[in-house]
């Protein structure tokens, strides 16, 4: 039995501490007994030689509301029974979880596409700024062209 | 009380602080005059957005912040990773 329970169809959170993937998915699964399938994606801080830490900062009045709107859009677009979108902020180490997305739908295709859609938009359009600490100090991560082409897939 | 100006992401490094407080009211020209030249330069570029009271302005030159308002300067968000 999951200790954590989910009672709303769209569960969107910003977390300043580590997230328990197993518990979150167990609770999400329990909340969506009618779904035919659940697709989940876990994004992690990539162990990348020189990178010692990753820090995500956000802006309270915009970041969470933006994620909620995005999740609502995904629900409508892919006829989801529910979605879970949990994003870490603060300082993380290589191997730590940054983001957990799960989509529950009647049919698997919708669930796969919704998870993909959510990730592309979280990566490129959510109000989050990242910097990483390398051997010589902190460096802000700039936007990449790839992010825009990722978004263009959904236009 | 005045207007609080918040520097988000890399703008906080350029500003050397995360926020400042200035006299109200504050419009676009006033904002450009209150921040470092390097930040004013970035604000003039289209990539930097401005939010007032938690709402992103469609036209940032229409900024009209009143006493007690919070103005956030929002550089482009980071991509990368995963």
Image (cartoon, coloured by chain):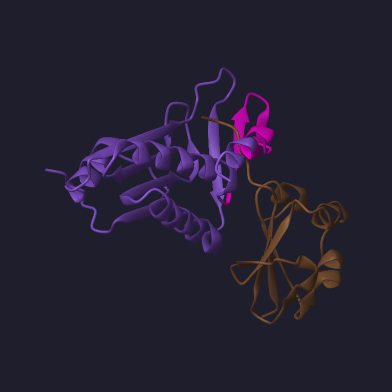
Chain colours: A purple, B brown
Q: Seen in the image, is A68 located left or right of residue A150?
A: left
Q: Is residue A99 visible?
A: no
Is A132 within the magenta?
yes
Q: Residue at x 42, y 38 (%)?
A: A113
Q: Seen in the image, is A25 located left or right of residue A100?
A: left
Q: Position of residue B39 (x, y in %)?
A: 81, 54
A67 is higher (above) or lower (below) than B28: above
Asked which quadrant contains residue A116, the reply is top left
Q: Residue at x 25, y 38 (%)?
A: A37
Range covered by the magenta-colored residues: A127-148
Is B78 within the magenta?
no
Q: Nearer the viewer, residue A138 or A123?
A: A123
Q: Is residue A66 visible?
A: yes
A147 is higher (above) or lower (below) than A12: above
A115 is higher (above) or lower (below) than A74: above
Q: Residue at x 68, y 48 (%)?
A: B76
Q: Position of residue B77 (x, y in %)?
A: 64, 46
Q: Seen in the image, is A143 located left or right of residue B43?
A: left
Quadrant where the N terminus of chain A is found in the figure: top left
């Amino acid at each position: 039995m999951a200790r954590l329970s989910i009672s709303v169809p769209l569960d969107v959170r910003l977390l300043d501490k580590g997230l328990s993937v197993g518990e979150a998915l167990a609770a999400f699964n329990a909340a969506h007994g009618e779904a035919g399938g659940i697709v989940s994606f876990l994004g992690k801080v990539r162990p990348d030689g020189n990178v010692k830490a990753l820090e995500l900062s956000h802006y309270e009045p915009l970041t969470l509301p933006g994620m909620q709107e995005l999740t609502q859009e995904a629900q409508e677009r892919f006829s989801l029974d529910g979605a879970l979108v949990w994003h870490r902020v603060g300082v993380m180490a290589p191997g730590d979880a940054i983001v957990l997305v799960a989509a529950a739908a009647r049919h698997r295709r919708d669930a796969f596409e919704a998870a993909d859609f959510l990730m592309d938009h979280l990566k490129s359009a959510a109000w989050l700024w990242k910097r990483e600490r390398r051997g010589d100090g902190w460096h802000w991560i700039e936007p990449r062209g790839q992010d825009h082409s990722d978004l263009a897939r959904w236009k | 009380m005045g207007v609080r100006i918040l520097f988000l992401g890399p703008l906080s490094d350029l500003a050397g602080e995360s926020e400042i407080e200035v006299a109200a009211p504050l419009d676009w020209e006033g904002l450009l005059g209150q921040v470092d030249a390097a930040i004013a330069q970035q604000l003039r570029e289209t990539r930097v957005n401005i939010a007032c009271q938690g709402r992103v302005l469609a036209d940032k030159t229409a900024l009209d912040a009143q006493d007690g308002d919070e103005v956030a300067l929002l550089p482009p968000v980071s991509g990368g990773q995963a």
